[in-house]
Image (cartoon, rainbow, N blue to C red):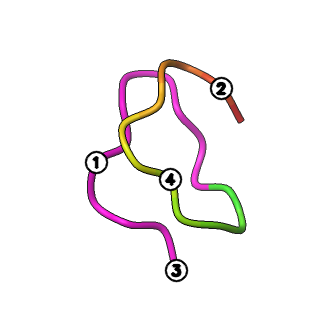
Amino acid sequence: PPRPGRAEGLQPAAGPTVGRPGLL
């Protein structure tokens, strides 16, 4: 599941997204 920490313009990808700059 998408983790809390998505940066601006970041889509909830099928993996652990940790505060990355606007990438998929």
Residues in magenta? 1-12
Residue 12 in which image quadrant: bottom right
Q: Position of residue 2 (x, y in %)?
A: 48, 68
- The Cα–Cα distance between marks 1 and 4, rounded to whole angstroms, is 7 Å
Q: On the rendered structure, is 10 left or right of 6?
A: right
- Going 38% across and 22% down the picture, which residue do you hit? 8
Q: Which residue is mark 2?
A: 23
Q: Which residue is mark 1?
A: 5
Question: Which amino acid does the dot numbered 4 rest on?
Answer: Thr
- Do labels 2 and 4 touch, CB within 8 Å? no
In the rendered image, the vertical position of residue 5 relative to residue 21, given as above or below: below
Q: Residues within 10 Å of mark 1 (few under 14, many from 20)?
A: few
Q: Which residue is mark 3?
A: 1
In the rendered image, the vertical position of residue 12 relative to residue 16, given as above or below: above
Magenta span contains residue 11: yes
- Do labels 2 and 1 touch, CB within 8 Å? no
Looking at marks 3 and 4 on the same chain, the residue that comes earlier in the sequence is marked by 3
Q: Which residue is mark 4?
A: 17
* SS at circle 1: loop
